[in-house]
Image (cartoon, rainbow, N blue to C red):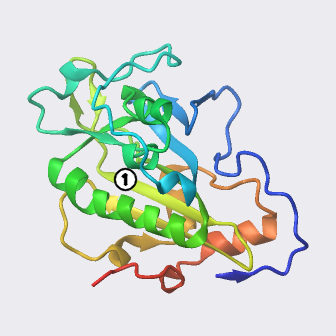
Amino acid sequence: MVSNQIAKKEIPVALEIPAVKPGEKVTKHLAYSLLFDKNSHQARWVAYELTEEETKKSFERSDKFTADPLINCNTSFQADYSKSGYDRGHLAPAADMSWCDQAVRESFYYSNMSPQLPAFNRGIWKKLETKVREWAIENKVLYVVTGPVLETGLPCIGPDHISVPKYYYKVLLDYTEPQYKAIGFLLFNEGSTRELDVFAVAIDSVEKITGLDFFPLLPDSLETQLESECNFTDWDNINPS
């Protein structure tokens, strides 16, 4: 956790968006943005701001998986998951989008899906998603980036050859006064009964394995300090009893 010794400044627009390389196109939906990877047929990252108000459920999940109208290359489809043994795992969870009918419907775009083992998707990953919402309530607003770790040589499923990641990550930034903090999580795509703190890592570690640059709009000195630390004790009740 870092004390705020910086003069109060306006929060940069799209603080959650990772650094984008030349030629990369960010797709923006109402409640989240993503960078689609056409080789693996899924998002490299999904990013969004989650406020305390947005954790209040106003609309039910649609459970209607559809193509993303803003993606002009092949995403996955139902045929890719059918009898594969994998869930259509949300990157931006529907429960984080249930404050708005359009947002929750867009969370079911196939561009927001990635192949996850059921024990992972419905277990430790869901547990982390729930904890993120609790922290958004506690801290008033969080900046969230989440996605698969995409590597060469991954196994594939379905007629479209959707890559099956071995790992998933989630990085969080609390950029509210009086103190700033950040944390990363790196999890195997498998079921686990272990506590969440086991998977907590410095954001620098996630950047190294993914090749991404998170929260580039932060002041350089603050970004360096926040991303080099893994102080999970700063995050209340990371392992609830």
Percent x, y for residue 87?
20, 39
Residue, x 50% and y 13% (percent of image)?
Answer: 72
Residue 138 visible in the shown view: yes
Q: Please name the residue that numbered disc 1 is placed on.
A: 168
Name the side, left or right, on which 223 lies relative to 60: right
Residue 50 placement: quadrant: bottom right
- Does residue 181 sit above or below 99 in this rendering? below
Q: Label 1 amino acid? A: Tyr
- Does residue 110 sit above or below 194 in this rendering? above
Residue, x 21% and y 59% (percent of image)?
Answer: 123
Residue, x 55% and y 34% (percent of image)?
Answer: 35
Percent x, y for residue 176?
70, 69
Percent x, y for residue 99?
49, 44
Q: Quadrant of the C terminus?
A: bottom left
Nearer the observer, 45 or 55? 55
In the structure shown, which secondary structural element does the residue marked by tag 1 occupy? Answer: strand
The outermost residue toward the left is 83
- Does residue 110 sit above or below 119 in this rendering? above
Percent x, y for residue 174?
63, 68
Residue 41 visible in the shown view: no
